[in-house]
Image (tube, helix red, strand yellow):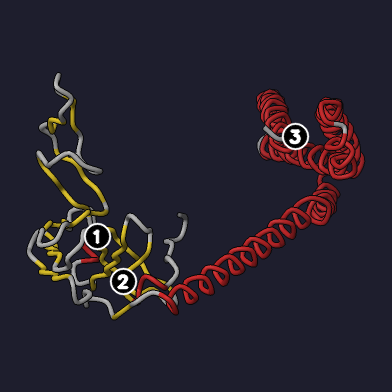
Amino acid sequence: MTFGQILILVVGGLTLSFLGRLLGSAMIAARRDYDGGQRTTTVFWVLFLAIASIGLGMAASRSFWLANSADATRAGWGGLLYMFIVPVVFLFAALAGGAVLGWLGSVVGRGGRIGLAVAVAVFLWFSLIAPMRDKARIEHREEQARLAAVRESQVEQLQAEKQRIPHGPTDTPPDFLTAERQETGVVLTNLAGDTYQFTVALVLPRGEGIERCQLMLEEKNCEPGATCAYRLAKDGSQIPIETTSYSGSAFLAPGRTKLFRYQSCMPRFKEAELEFQVWDARTRQYLYKSDSAFLPEFRLPGR
């Protein structure tokens, strides 16, 4: 846990405790005052004092931390001393600020309290809220720039791969592969004279990228292999376990056929085109890719 996270936890806990005590004081003051509108005025004034005091405490503790965070980081474990000082600064600023505002409120009367509230709100805006908002915007722009740089690098890498790997349009398998779309999935048949590894995906264009859903290969009681579970017999032979295994890729021997199922994809992929990728698992060399495989992956918001 970083110093900043510890700071948030400590100040947050103190803030809730402080607000609870001030709200309790407001309710007690309101119960003692039964003079019509005076009761409402008292409650709102004490609530304002509570919120303003917390805001002043947060502004002071934030300023203290920003001024000393570099020293705290360099100090290592010694930086924990600053963490103990931060809540002290918060409490002192909140209590002192609340006391001063309470005294000023009693001096200026009801009418002057409105101007006092406006002045405090303006101060907190420029000293606390606006800097935090600006910092969040700067961090957001920096993150967007970083993601754009990563995306640009990814696009360049994919386009470089496209220059050296055989490729073709989506929905078009290579010459040594047949693909038949059925109701439950896509059936692949290897027509080549060697065993290759295959993947199949449904793809949807999303701006300059692609949204991809990998089709899963379902195998039941399959022969022992990369995607099959098995147990060893006493003589050392492999006995397949009666189970169903799922994999995103398949090894297809010459003339073999396997079914990649749609069940892992959302309904929006129902009319999507097929993307094929084929490589030699022994040499790790790609033999074919659909053109969509050279587009960057599209990420839904929040992912």
- The residue shown at (90%, 44%) is 67
Does residue 34 appear in this view?
Answer: no
**Is 23 placed above or below 252 here?**
above
Residue 241 image point, x, y percent: 13, 31
- Residue 132 in sight here: yes
Q: Position of residue 172 (x, y in %)?
A: 22, 77
Amino acid, disc 3: Phe
Residue 3: give its label. Answer: 3
Residue indicated by mark 2: 288
Q: Label 2 sits on what residue type?
A: Tyr
Disc 1: which residue: 196
Q: Residue 264: horizontal and vertical position, in percent? A: 23, 53
Q: At 17% from the left edge and 39% from the top edge, which residue is drawn?
A: 224
User: Label 2 vs label 1: CA separation?
Assistant: 11 Å
Q: Against 164, is 108 above or below?
A: above
Mark 2 surroundings: few (<14), some (14-19) or many (≥20) residues within 10 A: many
Asked if residue 126 lies left or right of residue 161, the reply is: right
